[in-house]
Image: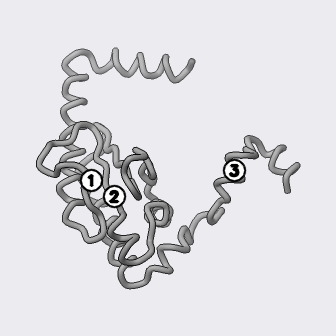
Amino acid sequence: FGVLVRAYVYLLSLGAQGLREAAEVSVLNANYVTRKLERIKGYKLPFDPSKPRKHECVFSAEPMKRDTGVTALDVAKRLLDHGLHSPTNYFPLIVREALMVEPTETEPREELDTFVGVMEKISREAYTDPDKVKNSPHSTAVRRLDQVRAAKKPVLSYRMLKKFS
């Protein structure tokens, strides 16, 4: 319920004109990131590149996987080593090795450029040292989770963690 109240307050604080501007900036950010990422080896746009994006852009890391064995999940985990939140991966399901990037209206261009720079660095690493990317994250407290086990037996509190340990 709290999230609904916060969303409503955010909308009220923006007002009609502010909401329109926020939407426009979100679309601009998505298209900016799209144009930058489509130039990087290993990532491809699965849909018509000439069409503008709305508030998100979907890329496929399938060429990278084919060339190096590095998957979309590996890319997402490597982003964590750089202090960046990973994009949604493997969604939509109709795109193989999908990475869905959703730059919001609050992201400044410098942050978008940082993200694109890290994605480019990850691409270079994938083609020169794929194991470095495949074995990431390296700098987080917890490395790779067993995602199947996590879905089947969620640990939602410290007490539950102690019980499973």
- For the point 35% across and 70% down, the residue is 64
Horizontally, residue 34 falls left or right of residue 154, namely: left
- Nearest to viewer (mark 1 / mark 3): 1
Q: Residue furthest right?
A: 163
* Kind of residue sitting beneath label 3: Ala
Q: Quadrant of the image for the C terminus?
A: bottom right
The answer to whether the residues at label 2 and label 1 have Cβ atoms under 8 Å apart is yes
Q: Secondary structure at mark 1?
A: loop
In x, y percent, where is residue 125? 38, 78
The tag earlier along the polypeptide, 1 or 3, is 1
* Nearest the eye: 56 or 5: 56
* Kind of residue sitting beneath label 2: Ser
Judging by the rendered image, the residue that carries numbered circle 3 is 150
Q: CA distance from mark 1 to mark 3?
A: 30 Å
Q: Which mark is residue 60?
A: 2
**Looking at the rendering, which quadrant does residue 41 occupy?**
bottom left
